[in-house]
Image (tube, rainbow, N blue to C red):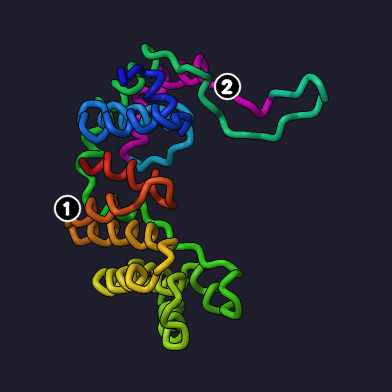
Amino acid sequence: MEIEYNNIEQYIQGELTGKELLEFEASLEKDEELRKKVHFYQYAMSTLADNKVYTKAEEEKIAQINPILSELRDQYFMDKTAQTDTSTKEAIPAKSTVIKRWFPLAALAAAAALLIFFLLPQLQNQSNAKIAANHFKAYPLGNQMGDLEETIKNYNKGNFAKADQQLTDLLKELPNSPDLWLAKGCTKFKLNDIDEAINSFEKVIEIDDSGISQPYANWYLALCYLKKDDRKKAMYHLNNIPKGSDKYNEARDLLQQLQ
């Protein structure tokens, strides 16, 4: 498959399917330059879409190139909030700014070059622990868990020390619940007890015969090993997340960042 820039855009937008997707991913696996391009363009697109949260240092850098980025954003992005359906005359529901189709190569390359020049050194210098913290989001415990209202309330509110105690008690009664072990691992991660977090997520892999919860366990194990400054084990667990499963796309993006 000859890689063209529209293929990169389609891949980033999740629009490649079937044979084209398999061929692109095969190229991505063996072509380091292609991986870098995809990562750079993802970063450029997210910045031009105006939906990225920056650190103070990044904001200072962005301020220097914002006039150019604003011009590119105005030229190549459109705001759907102002559109109306001409057949019904009803307003289309508000939606975030989106990329106009076939984002021109010259504009994308210019934006990527600016961002690489100004921000890439900071991105490359991020510690493994910082990368893990930026990608961590606690596993969602929902009402489907049943009569666990108080535990879920503390967990979802971020009262992790209290939730940790409650989860310890619950797991004595429900030792084969992957959801509870995932939550337990997340509380330990937030409490910076990384070894115990690893034990909890490994328990999920041990007891989950269905395989449904294992992508989450591998995702969190990868973040744990990043916290322990072990990129090799982190990448091992990211590669264990099967294609088409939950966390697969996030795992591929993180792998590109770590490579």
Circle 1 sits on which residue?
Answer: 232
Instruction: Decide which of 72, 220 is in the foreground and name it.
Output: 220
Q: Is residue 151 left or right of residue 84?
A: left
Q: Residue at x 35, y 41 (%)?
A: 56
Q: Is residue 156 above or below residue 56?
A: below
Q: Residue at x 39, y 22 (%)?
A: 7
Q: Residue at x 21, y 50 (%)?
A: 127
> Which amino acid is tagged 2?
Met
Which image quadrant for residue 259? top left
Q: Is residue 122 above or below residue 132?
A: above
Circle 2 sits on which residue?
Answer: 78
Inspect this view and state whether residue 99 appears.
yes
User: Percent position (x, y) of residue 70?
Assistant: 46, 21
Which image quadrant for residue 59? top left
Q: Is residue 240 above or below residue 79?
A: below
The residue sitting at the right extreme is 88
What span is colored magenta in the figure? 57-82
